[in-house]
Image (cartoon, grey):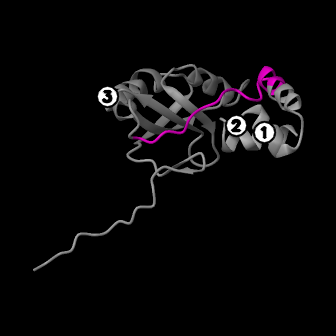
Amino acid sequence: MKEKIISLLRTNARLTAQEIAEILSVETAEVVSAVNEMENAGVIRGYTAIVTDDAPGSESRVKALIEVKVTPSRDGGFDRVARRIAKFPEVTDLSLLSGSYDLLLTVEGASLQQVANFVSDKLATIEGVISTATSFQLKKYKESGMVMQSDEEYERLKICF
């Protein structure tokens, strides 16, 4: 049942325990108990809203994806460096990757300069960080399975001679 609850919450975190219980044909108390148990165990870490880039306050934020190449430590592999990077408030997401880079970070800042300063002053100075590659997010088309824009028809301008 917990897997089904998680699946429903991933689709819509605003579902109430009663709504989930109705979908799963179980008692509401069972859902409440299962969700509380998963929250207390740290399985469910939080709930979030998926908002468009033109939402109030969004226009003042700059997002960057940063690929990081790391020298793994003998005793902790990539974890030691990743845990240190994760402590920075600018870092919103952090993943270990396969491929040419080891870590992928999503970083948010108030300006391009603030993100650039984070990379040069904080990230690049961490022992074990070999190199970084930064890409700034220009537009988001899809997030967490949700298309971010309506399916409006795009019509090219007619050219007349």
Per the image, label 3 sits on a secondary structure element best described as: helix
Give the quadrant of residue 104.
Answer: top right
Query: Is residue 126 highlighted in magenta?
Result: no
**Residue at 45%, 47% in the rendered image:** 140
Magenta: main secondary structure equals: loop
Residue situated in front as seen by the camera: 143 or 106: 143
Q: Are marks 2 and 3 in contact (CB under 8 Å)?
A: no
**Residue at 68%, 27% in the rendered image:** 79
Q: Earlier in the sequence, mark 1 or mark 2?
A: 2
Amino acid carrying mark 3 in the image: Gln
Q: Are marks 1 and 2 in contact (CB under 8 Å)?
A: yes
Span shown in magenta: 36-53
Q: Is residue 145 above or below residue 5?
A: below
| Residue that carries the numbered disc 2 in the rendered image | 15
Report the Cα–Cα distance between label 2 and label 3. Answer: 40 Å
Per the image, label 2 sits on a secondary structure element best described as: loop
The quarter of the image holding the N terminus is top right
Q: Position of residue 4 (x, y in %)?
A: 82, 43
Number of on-image labels = 3
Position of 7 with respect to 115 (left or right) is right
